[in-house]
Each structure stands twice: as C-alpha cells, then as structure tokens.
Amino acid sequence: MPRVNRAIELLEQGQPLYYTGAGELTYENGVEMAQTWADYLMVEMEHYAFNIPGLSAFMRGLIAGGPTRSGHRTPTVIATLPTDGTSEEVMRANAWMVKHLLTAGVHGLLLCHAETPGAVRAYVESARFPFQSIGVGEGLGDGRRGSGGQGTAAELWGLSVNEYLDKADPWPLNPQGELLLGLKIEDKRCLANAEANIEVPGVGFAEWGPGDMGMSLGYEDNHDPPYPEYMLAARARVFAACKSAGIAFLNGVNPDNVTEMLDEGVMIGSGGQEASEIGRKHTGRTMPW
C-alpha cells in the first residue's frame, strides 16, 4: 500500500476519518478487530491501565487477522497517553510513555490536557528520532527518541529497521512520516493557549474534549449537545485554531448530524458505523474499510 498508516493516507486524500475504541487488549481481540469498520482504533490509556504487554499482544493479533479490506497490514492504532500535557517538565518526565507505546507499534498518539506549548513541543520531540531534521530550529528542538525499540516496531509495521527509522516521524511535518500525533484541548488552561499549542510543528489533529471542557467551565455533565454558549465558544476557538494551522479537527458525530459536521469541516469523527457509512457516502469515499 502507499502508506503504513491508513488514517494519514485518507487525510492526504481529503477524506474524513472515523474511529472506534480498540476494546480489550488481547491477541484474540486484535484478530477480531483487524476487520473493523473504523479507520483507526483508539487505545484508551488515559483512564485505564498502561498495559504495554496487552497492547503488544493486541498488535500481533491485528497482524494475524489482517490485512484489512483496504489492503493495509493493520488498521491504524492511536493511543492516549496517561500523562497530561501540564508543562514541559511534566512531559519530559513522562517521555518514557511515548517510547514504550511507539515500540509497541502504534501509529499515533493523543496527548490529553495539552496545556502549554512547551508540553506540546516536548511531546513531539519525544516521538522523534534525533536525526530527523525537519522543523528543528523552527519551533522544535532535536528529537529525543533513542535507539533500541525500532526493531520491534519495524517488525510490527512490516518494514525493515531502516525503513521504519525513515518513516516513524510525525505527519504532516514530515510529508513521508507515518506517525499521527494529536492533542486534546479540553480544559480552560488548554484553551488559553489553544492557538500556540496547535501551531507546534508535528501536531496532526486536535479536539476540544467536551466532557472535560464542560467540567472545567463548571458543568457537571455537558458532554453531549446542546451546549451552553461558553462551550460553543470553546469549540469554535479550537476549531478555528485547527483551520489556521491546517490540521484536522476531531468532533463527535452521529447519523443525524454527520453530513452537517463534514460540511462544516470536521475531519475526524466518532459515532459508530452507521454514521461512518453515511459520511463516507457523502464524501465519495472509494477506499474500502
């Protein structure tokens, strides 16, 4: 296939993405999820166990159950990090999480509560090898990912080690990169720095996280619409920052609003298979899932 990462391939074609949760991190579930309807699988580690052995088994199950209907070795897998992006210091101290997840073969990461540009820069740098030079000196320092885990990750991706080293870099910063890095701008502290956070080179998508955003703004449970004015303003600010930076905006969708959301410019949606099928038809998707 043209790319390892199906999600990036679709975004390059101007096609929106639809995702679902990966579920239980076992080999058996990986085999089953290899034929998922979703464009990518989200591995939830923000609120649940940092289960690298389970993730490794799940990735091998995806390979055993593949290839996907689109011909890719596995569906794209993106994992949320347990650490928050509170500050550069916090992200540096927890960069080991990035290394462990990338060694396990994931194709992307999502940093929750991305509060400061320093934290976001540290996040991106943690995912990059130091020989990758695009963006260095232009908003980024040298990469901090060391040698040691690339052999395992390369095997999972079906690449030689040298091929993996070349491709394991954030897109769209590196047009040939196969890693998709995201941010959750999901509380009032993140929102205060939304534009600066999203503009850090190496970020590929962002979302506004209505559940946490609502709590941060004083609402007990406002995850779903209709939203009060303050939450609509927060969403609009994050959406505008994504448009300005030229990256994808993630928002929940459902069968009733998916076409409206896509016409608005939403490029990543969660909401189930029915919504995805309506959305794919609306945008003329040709790649099979």
Image (cartoon, grey):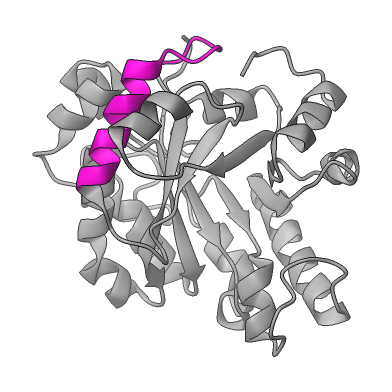
Query: Could you say where residue 204 lies in the image, as x and y percent from the top left?
Result: 54, 45
The location of residue 122, given as percent across then percent down, is 33, 62
- The quarter of the image holding the C terminus is top right
Vertical relation: 276 (above or below) 117: above
Residue 241 in sight from this viewpoint = yes
Q: Quadrant of residue 14?
A: top right
Counting every numbered tag in the picture gives 0
Left or right of 104 on screen, residue 75: right
Q: Position of residue 12 (x, y in %)?
A: 62, 25
Residue at the farthest front position = 28
Above or below for 38 versus 48: above
Q: What residue is at 31 percent from the left and 53 percent from the top?
A: 125
Residue 193 forms part of the magenta stretch? no
The verdict on residue 55 being magenta is yes
The segment highlighted magenta reads 53-73
Residue 143 visible from this viewpoint: no
Q: Position of residue 144 (x, y in %)?
A: 21, 52
Q: Residue at x 45, y 44 (%)?
A: 23
Q: Which of the 4 quarters of the picture holds residue 214?
A: bottom right
**Residue 234 appears left or right of 113:** right
Q: Main secondary structure of the magenta part?
A: helix
Residue at image location 50% in from the left, 38% down from the top: 41
Return the residue found at the far left. 148
Residue drawn at (84%, 73%) of the image: 227
Quick check: 267 above or below 44? above
Of residues 105 and 125, the one nearer the viewer is 105
**122 lies above or below 272:** below
Front-lying residue, 97 or 211: 211
